[in-house]
Image (tube, rainbow, N blue to C red):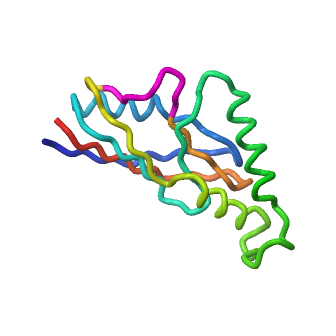
């Protein structure tokens, strides 16, 4: 068994979903791991990770619209407002999604479905550089 880990930096332009599956696959190929498990972890409390459809861009647009309604930017609703009107809604969105994903490695590739991609879900309005840790374990 072997292990490998790395850190990716994902730049964002503000709220939205940013697919980075190709970067993960490229790193995984370098590890020459045939079978195992990949953990993807985002090191932030106002961004999250999702595995979502990557064929129809309407899916990611609808997700952002839904989460905007679910956790609106309205300072009257929250106590934590010191970091701006988008901060507490970003924390709520991150709490409702995931900061860590596990994806099986099968025959040297991520075992994602045909239309699945790995996305960073940026919940803040301003651009950020988000740190994502990849950890693969297998043989």
Vertical side of 66 occupied by 35: above or below? above
Q: Residue at x 61, y 22 (%)?
A: 55
Q: Position of residue 114 (x, y in %)?
A: 49, 20
Give the x, y percent position of residue 23: 44, 33
Residue shown at 61% from the left, 60% from the top:
46
Relative to 55, residue 103 above or below: below
Judged from this view, the residue extending furthest toward the left is 1
In the picture shown, does residue 79 fall above or below 134?
A: below
Quadrant (top left/top right/bottom left/bottom right) for the N terminus: top left
Give x and y (percent) for residue 81: 76, 74
Q: Which percent across, then down, holds residue 52?
A: 57, 34
Compared across the picture, whether 6 is left or right of 46 comes to left
Residue at coordinates 66% horizontally, 57% vertically from top-left? 93
Instruction: Locate residue 77 relative to residue 25 in the image: left or right.
Output: right
Of residues 67 and 87, the one nearer the viewer is: 67
When asked about the image quadrant of residue 82, the answer is bottom right
Residue interval drawn in magenta: 109-117
Asked if residue 105 is positioned above or below residue 89 in the image, the reply reads: above
Quarter containing the C terminus: top left
């Amino acid at each position: 068994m072997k292990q490998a880990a790395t850190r990716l930096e994902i730049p964002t332009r503000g709220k939205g979903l940013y697919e980075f599956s190709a970067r993960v696959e490229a790193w995984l190929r370098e590890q020459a791991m045939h079978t195992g498990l990949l953990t993807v972890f985002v090191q932030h409390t106002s961004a999250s990770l999702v595995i979502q459809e990557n064929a129809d861009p309407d899916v990611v647009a609808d997700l952002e619209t839904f989460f905007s309604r679910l956790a609106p930017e309205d300072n009257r609703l929250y106590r934590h407002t010191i970091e701006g009107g988008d901060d507490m809604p970003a924390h709520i969105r991150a709490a409702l999604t995931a900061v860590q994903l596990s994806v099986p490695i099968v025959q040297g590739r991520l075992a994602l479905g045909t239309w699945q991609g790995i996305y960073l879900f940026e919940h803040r309005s301003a651009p950020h550089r988000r740190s994502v840790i990849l950890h693969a374990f297998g043989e």
